[in-house]
Amino acid sequence: MRRLLVANALLLILVASSWPLFHSGFFRVHDYTHGARIAEMTRAVTDGHIPPQWSQNFGYGYGMPLYLFYAPLPYYFGAFVFWLFGSILFSVSSVFFLANLLTIVAAYYLGKRLFGSIGALLLSALITLAPYRAVNVFIRGAISEAWGIAASVWMLLGLVLVLQKHRHGWVVLALSTAGLLLSHNLITMIFLPFFTLFALVFIVYKKAWKQAITTLGSTLLGVGMAAYYILPAFLEKSLTQVEGRILTHYFDFHLHFLYLRQLITPYWGYGGSVWGPVDEISFFLGYGMLTGFVLVAAAVFQTIRKKKNVRSYQLMLAVFSFLLGCVALLMTTEKTLFIWDQVEVLRFVQFPWRFLSVAIIFLSLAITSGVMTLRGRVLKIVITGFLVILLLSNARYFRPESYLADPEQLYSADESQIAESMSGILPDFMPESFDETAVPVNFSKVVIDPTLPQESELVNRVHEKLVFATFTDETELTFAIADFPGWQVEIDGKRVGHQKSAEGLLQVTVPTGSHLVGVLFLPTPIRTWANGISVVSILVLFGIMLHRERQE
């Protein structure tokens, strides 16, 4: 009976956070390029470009190394769904839905490991139904950030499993670490310091020195599995226009600090973040979480004052999680400006309020831990039920402003639409020397100068092109490709050098006569090493799993 009640409650949480995703249409969000990203990912994989790194149609049809720098994991899943069912809208909706499902499952099992089924239900509701998650999914469309939150909870679950000596804990921790790194760069950057502190405190508290080695090894193994993405993303980002586009003007972090009152103000809007306390988007923590603070503070105070018998680790977990959550909240405010100004890498976060992703996780842990310090099972059940019902009322936030009459205008796999309409929305990772103002939009030609007949274009895949051309004089052949490290040119099967045109396009000198001219996108030395590290790490993962299975 209890299991049935818990299952029904979890289903209610899933429905409350996801019900608009079952609508036959779709809605507009701030970042509506997800359909295009999924389509470009699918196109790359079906063309044999694995791991997919180059997008053929972004960059105004001249391409850009999108998935070298933009965390790809949600789009792997979206591409699989698109390949399977052929619907961009369904694939986008599926990516959104899976972010909610992964969060619920991870939070539930984390709570169950720490507190039992009652605490598991409360923790799942607190994290999943946090209004900031509704902002990410139904207003901003920050689906990678939503996946990052889910992966962060999975990492905490992996850590707890390791500390509890669960036989598969190290696998969960390694895979979730890789999942976080492949889901969202910025959430990874801001979550890992909090995770490290959380892990250190609990390792010291439990004196789990052997598990500390397992924790470190599993985390490093996860980093190794994601190395094929994170190493080039970090070491080659200077070869793109990303810093000039995302670190200036509107994206300057100084413009997006929160005021503490915004966290308790129940305003809800579908606009954007602006300077000052009058944002047209909400950063409300929600009545459920705020009520939980009050109840838990009273309960913990009463417990300490009367020196009631309570499991010390639960009290420590409540206090320490609360402190971590408060630090994350402070990082959203100008009170921590001195940190933002000193730690240069934080400028890439752009919006200080992204730290709410971390805050909602640890504050939810604090509230759940506090409730579990209460004496009496009935009291725990009553307060948990009350808070879950209050949290379910957050369903009113988990909805779009309106549905689109023609969603295909924003969510489409059409190559020309991606080149013409979507490229200006996502220009961040265009190659450094590419000048989009000097070339027309292209979505069909392999070579733009000189003009070649259609039958001359023999191969036109995302990562490789081949043309057959005859010239009476030595000719500069300009491909419709934004030149970027990794592109190599062959003439009649022999590797030759190439140059960039004034617009930043790939250009090669072709001698007189008839020739096969091909270009291929190949790994640079950095990418080769990164790919090797990932392959070795995956082999190590399976090797350890097989070895342990044989031992048992």
Image (spheres, rainbow, N blue to C red):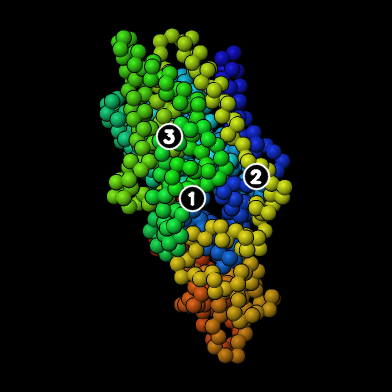
Could you say whether the residue bearing mark 3 is in a helix, strand or loop? Answer: helix
Instruction: Find the distance from the CA under tag 1 to the CA under tag 3.
Output: 33 Å
Q: Name the residue type under label 2.
A: Phe
Q: Neighbour class for label 3 at 10 Å: few (<14), some, many (≥20)?
A: few
Q: Are marks 3 and 2 in contact (CB under 8 Å)?
A: no
Q: Which quadrant is home to the C terminus? A: top left
Could you say whether the residue bearing mark 2 is in a helix, strand or loop? Answer: loop
Q: Which quadrant is home to the N terminus? A: top right
Q: Name the residue type under label 3.
A: Arg
Rendered image: mark on residue 71: 1
Residue for point 66% across, 77% down: 456
Horizontal placement of 274 versus 417: left or right?
A: left
Q: Are marks 2 and 1 in contact (CB under 8 Å)?
A: no
Could you say whether the residue bearing mark 1 is in a helix, strand or loop? Answer: loop
Horizontal placement of 49 versus 541: left or right?
A: right
Horizontal placement of 176 versus 208: left or right?
A: right
130 over 247 or under it: above or below = above
Q: Which residue is mark 3?
A: 261
Residue lying at the far bottom in this picture: please name it: 472
